[in-house]
Amino acid sequence: MRKLAGGWKWGAVPALASGSASAEMAWNFQEGATRAAQQVNDLHWLMMIIILIIFVGVFGVMFYSIFAHRKSVGHKAAQFHENTTVELIWTVVPFLILILMAWPATKALLNLRDTSAADITIKTTGYQWKWGYDYLKGEGEGISFLSQLATPYDQIYGNAPKSDNYLLEVDNELVVPVGKKVRILTTASDVIHSWFVPALSVKQDAIPGFVRETAFRADREGVFRGQCAELCGKEHGFMPIVVKVVSQEQYTAWVGEQRKKMAAAADDVNKEWMLDELNTRGEKVYAANCAACHQANGQGVPNAFPSLVGSKVVLGPADDQIALLLHGRKGVFMPGSAMPAQENLSDVDLAAVATYTRNAWGNAAEDKVVQPAEVKADRGKK
Amino acid sequence: MSAVLDQPGHGHHDEHADHPSGLMRWVTTTNHKDIGTMYLWFSFIMFLVGGVMALTIRAELFMPGMQIVRPEFFNAMTTYHGLIMVFGAIMPAFVGFANWQIPMMIGAPDMAFPRMNNWSFWLLPPAATLLILSFFMPGGPAGVGWTMYAPLTVQMGPAMDLTIFAVHILGISSIMGSINIITTLLNMRAPGMTLMKMPMFCWTWLITAYLLIAVMPVLAGAVTMTLTDRHFGTTFFNAGGGGDPVLYQHIFWFFGHPEVYIIAIPAFGVISQVIPAFSRKPLFGYTSMVYATASIAILSFIVWAHHMYTVGMPTAGQLYFMYATMLIAVPTGVKVFNWLATMWKGSITLETPMLFALGFLFLFTMGGFSGLVLALTAVDVQLHDTYYVVAHFHYVMVAGALFAAFAGVYFWLPKWTGKMYDERLGQWHFWLSIIFFNVAFFVQHFLGIAGMPRRIPDYSPQFTEFNMISTIGAFGFGVSQLLLLYIVIKTIRSGKPAPENPWEGADSLEWTHLPTPAPYHSFETPPVVK
C-alpha cells in the first residue's frame, strides 16, 4: 500500500495528471484541470456525505435491531405489521433529499455540456486502434496527425521493464493552449470508441458515421492522460489519449513546427524512395499498426489473423496490396476482427509498410519496392 | 379459485409408477419439483463456468502486463462471463425457485402447463452448448462485451452468430417460463388466497414474469437486427446505409434496464420470505411492498438511457433520464425500510438463510448508493465504462441476486430434500462469501474513480495495488463457492432428517400444510386459506 498516506487528502492524487507519476496509487478523482472537473469532484463529495449520513442511519437501525431484538437475549416478537404514518414519511423524505441532490447535479451537467464560444475546434477520429486529430478551426487550423500507443510490445509482454507512463504514452500528443476553450468533435471510422480524459472531465463516445461534440477549457498547464473507454475490439486497452496543455507562446511555436513538418511530408510523397529507406520506415510502421494481429514475425495467429509470410496478396501485384491496405476487408468468416482499412496512414507510410512486408521474413516479391506515388495514385481510385 | 384440481379419493397414487426412471425420468419429466431441481443444478454449473471465466479475467489483471491470455481472448472472457452469469446462472436460478416454490406456496399440485415447463428447461442446455461452441469457431469467440454493441458485433466471426442464436433460445425459454408462472399464479391459487394474500415471493415473480414477456422480444429484436446486418445486407446500425449504431444501444437498454429488475425482483421476493421467518414477525407493510415492487418494474421502462449518458444525446434528454433514474431510489428505499421495520422488535435468530438475507440487505443497499452516484449525469460522465460501474453492478448482481439465491437455497433445502444442512458449514460459507466479495469488489470503486476503464486486459501501474487486492478477493470468493456444493451434497447424502417446519417463524403453505420432504405432487387437495 505504498504512498497511501500521501493520498488521503481532500481532493485528489495528481496521479495521471502529472507528467510521470503513474506508479503512484490512485484512489480518487484525478485533480481536475477544468472547472467542470472541479464541479464533478465537489458533487461527488456532496453525494458521499449524504450517503454516509443515510448509511449510518439505515445500518444503525439494522445493527441495533440485530443486537437488541434477538431471540437469544430473550426478546419477544411484537406483531405489528403496518403503520401508514411511517410509510408516508419514508416515502416523502427520500423524495425531498433527491430534489436537494438534483439541483447541483443539474447545474454541473449544464456547465459540462456547454460547448459554445470555442476558440479551437478539433476533430477526433477513433480508429482501430489509434486516434486521429484534425485541427478544424482556430489557431493551428489544418494540422492533422495520428496518435497511437508509444509503449513497446516488449514492455507489455514482460520482456522489458515498464516505463513510467506505461500504456498511457503516445507518439504524437494532442497539444492545446491553456485557458482556451477547446471544442472536440468526435467520430470514428470503424466501431464505437470513446474519448476519455479524466482530469478534463471529458468522455464522449466516437460513433462511426456521426459527429458528437464536447468541450473543455484547461485552467492549468500539464500533461493529461486518458484511454479509450468503449470496447472497440482486440487492442481496446492499448489506445491511450494524451493531451498536453501548454502556454499560448509554446502553442504558437508548436503550430509553426507542425506546419513545417507537414510541408516536408508533402514533398516526400513525390520523390523516388530507395528500398532501404522504405524498409527501415516500414518496419516501424508495421510494428505500430500491423504487429498486433499479424505478429512481429509476420506469421499471424492461426485461425484468426492470416500469415503474411508467403501470402499471395503480399507477394502479388502492388495495386492489389495497396487496395487491401487502403480499404480493408470485411471479415465475416475470417478473423476475430476484419482487416481494418488503413487509409488514415500516409502514402509514404503505406508504401513503406508494403515494401517492408514484401522483403521481410524471407518474403521475396517480384516487385520489391512500392513507391508512395503509387499509393497516392491508387488512393484516388475507388 | 376453482381451477385447482381436486380429486377426492385419489390421495395416494404411486408417485413414480407411470414415470420412466434414470435419465429418461429427467428428460421427460413434467413435475415442477424435478424441473425446479434441474434449473437449479443447471444454474450452478453455469455459475462455475462463468466463475472460471471471471477468475481468468482477474488472474490476467493481477499485475500490469499481459501474462496469461491474449487481448482478444480476454475480451471473450468478459463477454461470455457476463452472458453466462446473467442468462445462464442467475435467471435460471430464480426460475428454479419459482418452479419449486410457487405451486407449494399457493396450494397447487403443479405448474399450469407442465409439458411447456419441461420444454422451457430443456431449451437451456442447447443454448449453453451454443455459447460454449463459440469458443471453437474459426476466428475464435466473440469479444464484444455482454452488451454486444454494434457495429463491433458486425466484425466478429461465426461465433457471434452462435451467440445470437443462444440469446434467441434463452429468450424463448424465459418467455415460456413466464407464461407458465403467470397462468399458475392467476388461476391455481388455493380457495381463499386472494392476490393480496399471496406470499411476497409469488408477487415478485408475477411482476417479474410480466417484465420478461415485455422485454425478451425486444432483446431478440436487437440481436436479430445484428444478425441481418451481418449477413443479409441490412444497415440498421450502419450510418453508411442510413442506420445508426446508437439505435442498437437504445433497443438493448430498453431490454437491459428492466433485465436488471428481472434479476433483482425475485431476489426481493426471497428476502421478503426469509427476513419475516427469522424475525418471527409478519412482513411489515405488505401492501406497500407490492406497490413498491410494481413501481420499480414500471419505472424500469423509462430510465434506459442512463446507461448511455456519453453517447451524445441532447442535454434535455440527459436531464430527463437523470431525474427518472433518481426516482427509482424512492420505491427501492421503501423496500429496504420495510425490511428493517420487519426486523424491528422481532425475535431474531441468525441461521444461515438470515445471514445471507442480511448480507443481501447490507450490500444491495451499498449497490443502491453507488447507483445513486451514477445516476447523476455529470458524475457518470467520469465514471461510465470504468471499474466503478463494474463494482456497482456486482454489488447489485452478486451481493444482491446471488446472496438472495443462497438465502433461498438454505431456507428451502430442508423442505426440498427432507434433510437439514450443516449449520456450521453454512455459516462458514456466508462469512467467507461476504468477506471475499468485499475484498474483490469494494476496491474496484477506487479504480473506477481514479479512471481505470473496464474491459481492458492491461493497465497502468498506478492501478496495481487495488487490482491485486481485487484478484485475491475474487479467488477467495470463487473457492468459497465450492463449499456450497459440498454442503448441498452432504445434506442430500447424510443430512439429519428435517421436521415439517424447521423454522419457527415460517408461515407460508409449504411449511404449514406439507410434510417434509414435500410430496411429488404438492397439493392434491387444495388447502383452504382463511
Image (cartoon, coloured by chain):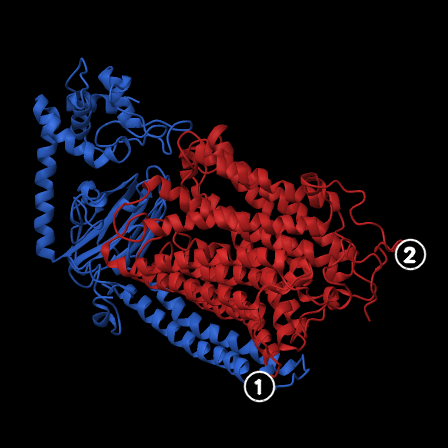
Which of these two is toward me, A179 or B208?
B208
Q: Quadrant of the N terminus of chain B?
A: bottom right
Q: Is residue A366 above or below residue B188?
A: above
> In screen coordinates, is B28 left or right of A190?
right
What is chain B's hue in the picture?
Answer: red
The answer to whether one can see residue A262 in this image is yes
- Residue at disc 2, secondary structure: loop
User: Label 2 is found on which chain of the structure?
Assistant: B
Q: Alpha-carbon neighbours of circle 2 within 10 Å: few (<14), some, or many (≥20)?
A: few
Q: Which residue is mark 2?
A: B8
Name which residue lies at 27% across and 19% down: A311
The answer to whether one can see residue A113 in this image is no
What is chain A's hue in the picture?
Answer: blue
> What amino acid type is highlighted by mark number 1?
Val
CB contact under 8 Å: marks 2 and 1: no
Q: Which residue is mark 1?
A: A73
> In screen coordinates, is B387 left or right of B1?
left
Residue A58 location (% of width, % of height): 50, 78
Residue B52 location (% of width, % of height): 43, 48
**How far apart, in angstroms, are the residues tagged by discs 2 and 1?**
48 Å
> What amino acid type is highlighted by mark number 2?
Pro
- Residue at disc 1, secondary structure: helix
